[in-house]
Image (tube, rainbow, N blue to C red):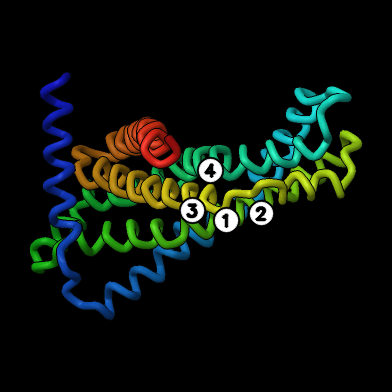
Amino acid sequence: MMIKGLKNIGNYFIMMKKVMSRPEKYSVFLKQLKLEIGKIGLDSIGIVIIISFFIGAVVTIQQSINLENPLLPKYLIGLVSRDALILEFAPTMIGLILAGKIGSSIASEIGMMKVTEQIDALEIMGINSASFLILPKIIAAMFFFPILIILSITIGIIGGWLGGLSMDIPTADFVYGLQYQFIPFYVTYSLIKTVVFAFLITSISAFYGYTTKGGAINVGKSSTLAVVYSSILLLIFNFILTDLILS
């Protein structure tokens, strides 16, 4: 098991060396990049809005219950909800959701190309298949994921405000809590995590798709492994980055 894991790590870095090569035709690369921005970024906006809204509402309701004390000012609910959304819920939870949605899509797409020998055909034509297929996905994700997280934080705060209204928290108190002792670096920290998560999700998912062998059943297995391992590494790097940046 350990030998297989080390082999996979080695194969991953070999693949990434191929991926990070210079594009052969920038016009083709830019066309592929626009396509991936649409598939990875724009198609994810809907699910990000829905999840973020209800996460924000639930976080605020939970905080209002936990802080239900006449000695505690109500604006603390807005403050705690703001920091929870920015620091953890938006980047990490949305990252895990996107690992499932985008990771499985990337692994199955590339895996199907692998088992149907389309990748072999690209290699025969002298095209660096790893760079052609994977690099646009990585760049698109690293570019668009921060936009999705900013959107997630915004929608989450709106959902938190409405959740607060359902718990009789005045809008003025909630807004004051959002503004109280706001640390702009928290947003920077959230975006740094998001860019790292984007790279992990796309590269790991692409690796499992690119190394798929066999038939359609193995494509499904590769897709599952891509989601599992990208989610695990996302959580590990979440701990590492939090310890390095915030401590």
Q: Earlier in the sequence, mark 3 or mark 1?
A: 1
For residue 224, say whether it is visible: no
Residue wearing tag 1 = 150
For the point 23% across and 64% down, the residue is 132
Secondary element at image label 4: helix
Disc 1 to disc 2, C-alpha distance: 6 Å
In the drawing, what numbered circle is on residue 26?
none
Front tag of 2 and 3: 3
Secondary element at image label 3: helix
In the drawing, what numbered circle is on residue 154?
2
Disc 3 to disc 4, C-alpha distance: 16 Å
In the picture provided, is 236 more to the left or to the right than 46?
Answer: left
Secondary element at image label 1: helix
* Three-letter code for the amino acid on which mark 2 is drawn: Thr
* Three-letter code for the amino acid on which mark 3 is drawn: Thr
**CB atoms at circles 1 and 2 under 8 Å apart?**
yes
Disc 3 to disc 1, C-alpha distance: 11 Å
Splitting the image into 4 quarters, where does residue 223 fall? top left
For the point 76% across and 36% down, the residue is 77
Dot 2 crowding, Cα within 10 Å, few <14, some 14–19, many 20+: many
Residue wearing tag 4 = 94
Q: Earlier in the sequence, mark 2 or mark 3?
A: 2
x%, y% of residue 147?
52, 60
